[in-house]
Image: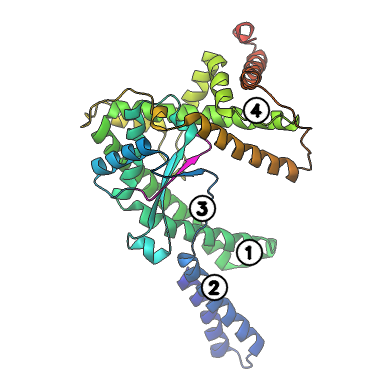
């Protein structure tokens, strides 16, 4: 990108001096600005501090000693340093990153940050959660998190440049730099996606060797399943209640209730679709079913702990309500952006919130089965 910026601008200036009898000074200055400005924009993008959204709840070792003890165990198993900050996030996910300046992160001196979805913990055993954490620590031990910010900045710069050029209209099609950047972006995405899929498999291997391939497989399936439930019901439940003035203070209890009454055939079908979706050229992760199959049968080093993962938290009910309040705040912002005003405040018992979520799940299942003319619709109703 630096070369194309310099060669395009300076090359055009050279051609002007070589073949034109009169040199338009304003055009020369414009080309210099394009060449030097484009180069500066690319180089600057590599060293800008990336702002990562942090909707989650920052927790410390004093607040959650058992969770941090599990994290320390996994770090020792993975042979890498402990994370510096832990955020409990709203949904079902787990991810790591290194925070700090570009040189700091590339040198391995960035702050290690773990984002762990609170809803991820539901349904997992302790060993299964540790297998998920071992996968995330594998990204640290393989050094991948040092390169991730650089890749992200380059991708962001490419997209911004192309978006700004495309905003000029069809005339941009006459610009060779535009086409060069388009093809470069496709090649860059394809290459980095391939690298990303490989690093996911390496991290899976680290998790399987530590806690067992079958344990990791069950954990990954549970995380995928939890993600399907959260994406399907969290927004509708929280939004519909909030519109009527009822804050969904027991959202995670409501999600568990929706999951319990969901039609088994539909639930299995949705989970299978998420596990077995065909891989795309630009996917950053291999299909979960492929990852589970690769890890199957690998013997782990650690003894199995079947206790609920949620028991690692000191006060899970309080944490659930704190995260539900953040979701309520997000819903309020979305409603305000749409020009919708929430109804007058109305108290709602926790049991009623669960019943409401059950009703949404049953209605959605019955509607879907009715559209398919499926004989199970009567049971779903």
Horizontally, residue 338 falls left or right of residue 107, namely right
Residue 334 image position (x, y, % from top left): 69, 42
Distance from Cα at disc 2 to Cα at disc 4 = 47 Å
Tell me which segment is drawn in magenta: 83-93
Report the side of 23 relative to 294 (left or right).
right
The x and y percentages for residue 130 are 33, 34
Residue nearer the viewer, 155 or 203: 203
In the rendered structure, which disc, 1 or 3, sits on the residue that comes first in sequence?
3
Q: CA distance from mark 1 to mark 4?
A: 41 Å
Q: Which structural element holds mark 1?
A: helix
Q: Label 1: which residue? A: 165
Rounded to the nearest angstrom, the CA distance separating label 1 from label 3 is: 26 Å
Q: Which-is-in-front pick, marks 3 and 2?
A: 3
Mark 1 / mark 2, whichever is N-terminal: 2
Q: Residue at x 65, y 64 (%)?
A: 172
Which of discs 2 and 4 lies nearer the camera? The answer is 4
Name the residue tied to disc 4. 237
Q: Which residue is mark 2?
A: 38
- Residue under numbered circle 3: 52
Q: Is residue 204 magenta?
A: no
Examine the rendered structure and indicate whether residue 253 appears above or below residue 33.
above
Q: In terms of depth relative to the viewer, which is nearer, 310 or 54?
A: 310
Residue at image position (68%, 24%) is 348
Could you tell which of marks 2 and 4 lies nearer the N-terminus? 2
């Amino acid at each position: 990108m630096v070369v194309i910026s310099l060669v395009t601008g300076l090359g055009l200036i050279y051609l002007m001096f070589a073949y034109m009898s009169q040199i338009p000074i304003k055009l020369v200055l414009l080309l210099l600005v394009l060449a030097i400005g484009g180069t500066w924009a690319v180089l600057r993008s590599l060293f800008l501090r990336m702002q990562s959204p942090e909707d989650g709840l920052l927790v410390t070792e004093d607040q959650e000693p058992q969770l941090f003890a599990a994290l320390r165990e996994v770090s020792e198993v993975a042979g890498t340093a402990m994370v510096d900050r832990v955020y409990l996030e709203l949904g079902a996910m787990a991810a790591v990153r290194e925070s700090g300046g570009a040189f700091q992160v590339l040198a391995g001196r960035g702050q290690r940050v773990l984002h762990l979805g609170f809803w991820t913990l539901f349904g997992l055993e302790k060993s299964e959660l540790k297998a998920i954490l071992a996968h995330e620590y594998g990204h640290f031990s393989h050094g991948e998190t040092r390169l991730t910010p650089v890749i992200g900045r380059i991708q962001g710069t490419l997209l911004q440049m192309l978006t700004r050029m495309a905003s000029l209209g069809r005339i941009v099609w006459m610009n060779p730099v535009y086409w060069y950047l388009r093809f470069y972006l496709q090649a860059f995405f394809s290459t980095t996606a391939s690298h990303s899929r490989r690093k996911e498999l390496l991290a899976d291997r680290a998790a399987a060797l530590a806690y067992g391939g079958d344990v990791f497989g069950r954990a990954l399936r549970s995380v995928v399943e939890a993600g399907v439930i959260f994406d399907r019901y969290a927004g509708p439940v929280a939004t519909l209640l909030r519109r009527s003035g009822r804050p969904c203070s027991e959202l995670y209890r409501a999600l568990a209730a929706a999951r319990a009454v969901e039609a088994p055939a539909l639930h299995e079908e949705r989970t299978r679709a998420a596990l077995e979706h065909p891989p795309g050229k630009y996917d950053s992760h291999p299909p979960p079913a492929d990852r589970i199959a690769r890890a199957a049968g690998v013997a782990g080093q650690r003894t199995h702990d079947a206790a609920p993962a949620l028991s690692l938290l000191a006060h899970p009910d309080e944490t659930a309500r704190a995260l539900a309040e953040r979701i309520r705040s997000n819903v309020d912002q979305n409603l305000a952006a749409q020009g919708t005003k929430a109804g007058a405040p109305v108290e709602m018992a926790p049991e009623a919130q669960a019943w409401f979520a059950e009703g949404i799940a049953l209605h959605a299942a019955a509607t879907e089965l009715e559209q398919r003319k499926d004989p199970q619709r009567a049971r779903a109703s």
